[in-house]
Image (cartoon, rainbow, N blue to C red):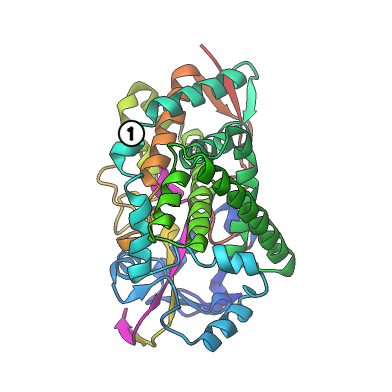
Amino acid sequence: MTEAAPNGDAANFTFAPLSPDFARDPYPTYRALREKEGLHYFADFDIWLASRFEDVSAIVMDKRMVRSLEDLATKEELSKLQRAANWHDMPHHERFVQFSLLDSDGAVHDRLRKQVFKLFTPAMIAKLRDQIQAYVDRLIDSLADRGEIDFVDDLAAHVPGHIIGRLLGVPDEDCPQLRIWSENIVQFFDVDRSDGRKELAERNTTEFYEYLTALKAERERAPKDDLISVLIEAERSGAMNFDEFISTCMLILMAGHGSTIDVLGSGMHALLRFPEQMARLRSEPGLIQTGVQEMFRYESPLPFFHRHCVEDIEIFGRRFERGTKFGLLYGAANRDPKQFENADTFDIGRTPNRHLAFGGGVHFCLGNHLARLDMDIIFSTLLRRFPTIEPVDREPEYKRGLSVRGPKRLKIAIRPA
């Protein structure tokens, strides 16, 4: 744990991202970080944390900043870093998760992104609206008479994975398992990399790899109109190899699960905490798109990412050596009062709203249009069908960690018209 204070008094400020207090409300910590001069060094990650909107934006858009150390270190140095972070001795995780479209740069990143970009354009995603609406309607029909539901487990958890799974070509009955694999793999990206969490990540990566390999063989025998069949053709044409195929499928499925479930949960929690905003959205349903954007800003579901500098650089008033790691605290930047008026207020009509929840630059989130469409349909449908939506859990428990933000459960009372 690293300790320092905004004014240099170490006794007044503690950065403890695994603590229950941080999970409950990280924003006082983020505020203290923004008030510190320069960047904050977090020894546990050997990383310099950027928390102000201006600073995070500058790093995101700086072409001297990359995701991967592949071109910055020798194999021996990479191996040493891997062991220091406990990323070693997990062959399938190293092969398919530690390398991905997300964690590549330059020509490799451009080549892989090109294979999937055309399938995630606004026009392509808009074609899914009727399909998503029909699925959400059926799901809500099954919940309507219960009176009380867990919004996360009973509703939010079922939609993103089902839709991204169907887009990729996964049978509907297999989609619940995808969520389990995804969450158990992604958990190892956070600060706690104990051996138990490591074994869980590797075992689930192996099972996921075996499943995708079998599904790929099926599609090779009988292609369909799905993303897996498109990626098989990309592999055949030489645009990607087998490992890149598996890695890309995993990334799409993992990215389409956890973060959207989390922002659905925190978005509903925000509407419950600010009932006047829920009432406003009921009376002005056309605000759903700005409302969804505000949900991403107000509680960014992926509040932390990183970059490395490819050369010695001088930024933010000091010099940093080549290979230095920078932490991008999107969750802090999106509450920066210098960028957002009344930054701690949830405002569904906020405009402009140039938040950083989807990242920026060449790594801007591919799935943002699909995530926003899922949320648009879910919240619009709920508000239309249930005149009464009230909290049962006043203070839901949020997930612990630096890399995630979302409630574990969120019990609500619903009453139809």
Mark 1: which secondary structure? helix
Q: Residue furthest top?
A: 417
At 45% from the left and 51% from the top, the residue drawn is 232
Q: In the image, residue 280 lies at what x, y percent?
A: 37, 27
Decide whether residue 37 is among the magenta residues.
Answer: no
Decide whether residue 300 is among the magenta residues.
Answer: yes
What residue is pinned by disc 1? 126
Report crowding for label 1: few under 14, some 14 to 19, many 20 or more residues within 10 A (C-alpha). few
Q: As rendered, which of 278 and 190 lies closer to the eye? A: 190
Q: Is residue 342 left or right of residue 249?
A: left
Q: In the image, residue 5 lies at what x, y percent?
A: 49, 75
Q: How many marks?
A: 1
Q: As rendered, which of 113 and 27 lies closer to the eye? A: 113
Q: As rendered, which of 231 and 363 lies closer to the eye? A: 231
* Start-end of magenta stretch: 295-318
Amino acid under label 1?
A: Ala
Q: Is residue 52 visible?
A: no
At 42% from the left and 68% from the top, the residue drawn is 104
At 50% from the left and 36% from the top, the residue drawn is 166
Above or below, comparing residue 137 to residue 218 in the picture: above
Instruction: Please identify the quarter of the rendering in which residue 132 is found.
Output: top left
Instruction: Please identify the quarter of the rendering in which residue 80 is found.
Output: bottom right
Q: Is residue 322 visible?
A: yes
Quadrant containing the N terminus is: bottom right
Above or below, comparing residue 181 to residue 52 in the picture: above
Q: Residue furthest left?
A: 352
